[in-house]
Image (cartoon, rainbow, N blue to C red):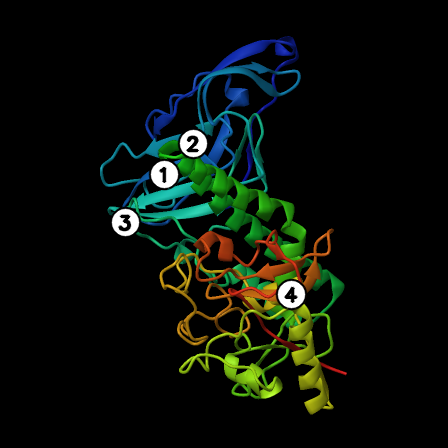
Amino acid sequence: MVAVIVTATALSAQENGKKHPIAVPAVQTDKDGGYDGSSATNCGIKFNTRLSGVTKVELESVDGNPLAGTARMDEDADTVETIEHASSVVTFRAADESGFTPGKDYYISTLPCDLYGGYRLSIYRNGLVAHYFGVHQTVEPGTFISPDDLVESELEFDKPGAPLVEEGRPKMDSKTHNLFIQYRRNPTEANRQALLDRMGIRYDKVVARKKNKLRELEREAKTYSIVEHMQGIVNEMVKNRDIRIQQQFLRFIDPRRDEDPNDGWMVLRGASAPNAYIGYTPVTNAEYAMFKSGFTYDKGKENYPVVNITIDEAEAYCDWLTEQDRKHVYRLPSEEEWILGAGHMPKDVAMNANRVKSGLTAVDAYSQSTGACGGIDFWGNCWEWTSSTDANGRYIVKGGAWDSKRDDCRSEKSDDVRIGTQGYANIGFRVVRTDF
């Protein structure tokens, strides 16, 4: 689709100061959009597809802002007042059963609307549907915006009604890839900022998908607790936006390669510590027993995560590792380092959580589920200590456990804390290794 903004002619001086009625229907066709109002204030989204067989396009504001309805336009202030029969969804159908004409411009009328937080554009074709999410755009009176970075070859079509879930690690789109290559070849500040800005857009598109899921739950969920939970996820993503983008960016541009992929230490890309690595798994019973004489565990559980360990005991284990290796320092990860190692938790990741098992499992029981660094067992099984604390001195734990809800295992969840002087049956730890 072609990016363009079309601007209508301004109102005549005689009309200034008037309030004109506007009616935008929630269902439109390419033969009769149904817009009723001044042509100078007609606005919305323009699309031009080269795909054949597209019979319907659906537009939704992920923030629930009204796109259709009956309103009055204050032309002095360019604002819409007293909207009735408001709808945040507009459906645009092809009158011809063969679909829209490829290469032709079509205009979906909307009310003037702030779409900076995101919008969903669903394209229906040959019985399937693909979803595009746009961000950072606003529909002003008299203008038609277009999806400015939609690449039709990157659309993924699926059956209508299929779960709208982002991939755990979405493929890099062509625009981001080109900016990444440009930065690698010429790491100037301008190229760095261009790549960082693009990653911000990618992040905001993920947030837009979450918001759209929230709107869907508001319409369909049977219990409000589900809606409330999703709202909490959206709020966290919005609140910590800049931190999360910076973490992703630093991981993204870190050029290091894993010198020995089989040594149990994974490159911790994006970490500020010198040459930081993180453990492939949480520390196991067998590994801890090598440090602490007299430590016992059940037969057959050598490869289970060690638990019931206090912060002091975990740090003592790290100090022991440092004594064995004069080239490196071993310690607990900070919360930020843990998140860098884990990355975003894929929605449908296989893990020991939500009581799918009756207790702990071996650290490699779900080895198919890898974190961003390539390590395993980041989510579920047992919480993991970090060196980070809250305002009350309690230690932040990450990753959830076998008896946690799946959503409580999310990497971004930051409100689970424990007392460091106490050991817990569902908390273990992972180690970070850095250079002296």
Residue at position x 45%, y 29% in the image: 88
Where residue 292 sits, quadrant-wise, is bottom right
Residue 391 percent location from the top left of the image: 74, 51
Which quarter shows the C terminus?
A: bottom right
Q: Secondary structure at mark 3?
A: loop
Kindly report which numbered mark, 4 or 1, lies closer to the viewer in this rendering: 4
**Residue density around tag 4, few if under 14, some if 14–19, many if 20 or more, within 10 Å:** many
Q: Which residue is mark 2?
A: 108
- Give coordinates of residue 124: x percent, y percent: 31, 43
Q: Earlier in the sequence, mark 2 or mark 3?
A: 2
Q: Residue at x 51, y 50 (%)?
A: 206
Among the two numbered marks 4 and 3 on one chain, the one whose residue lies closer to the N terminus: 3
Q: Is residue 223 visible?
A: yes
Amino acid on which the number 2 mark rests in the picture: Ile
Residue 120 in sight in this render: no
In this view, the mark in front (4 or 3): 4
Disc nearest the viewer among 1 and 2: 1
Could you classify mark 3 by the number of other residues whose Cα lies within 10 Å: few (under 14), some (14-19), or many (20 or more)? few
Question: CA–CA distance between discs 1 and 2?
Answer: 9 Å
What x and y, as percent, mark residue 204?
A: 56, 48
Residue 322's image quarter? bottom right
Lower position in the chain sequence, tag 4 or tag 1? 1
Secondary element under disc 4, as helix, strand or loop, is strand
* Cα distance in 3D space between marks 4 and 1: 47 Å
Verify CB contact (< 8 Å) between mark 1 and mark 2.
yes
Q: Which residue is mark 1?
A: 57
Q: Which residue is mark 4?
A: 386
Taking the image as shown, residue 414 lies to the left or right of residue 169, namely right
Mark 3 lies on residue: 159
In the image, residue 168 above or below residue 126 = below
Write the residue at 62% across / 16% down: 75
Q: Which of labels 4 and 2 is toward the front?
A: 4
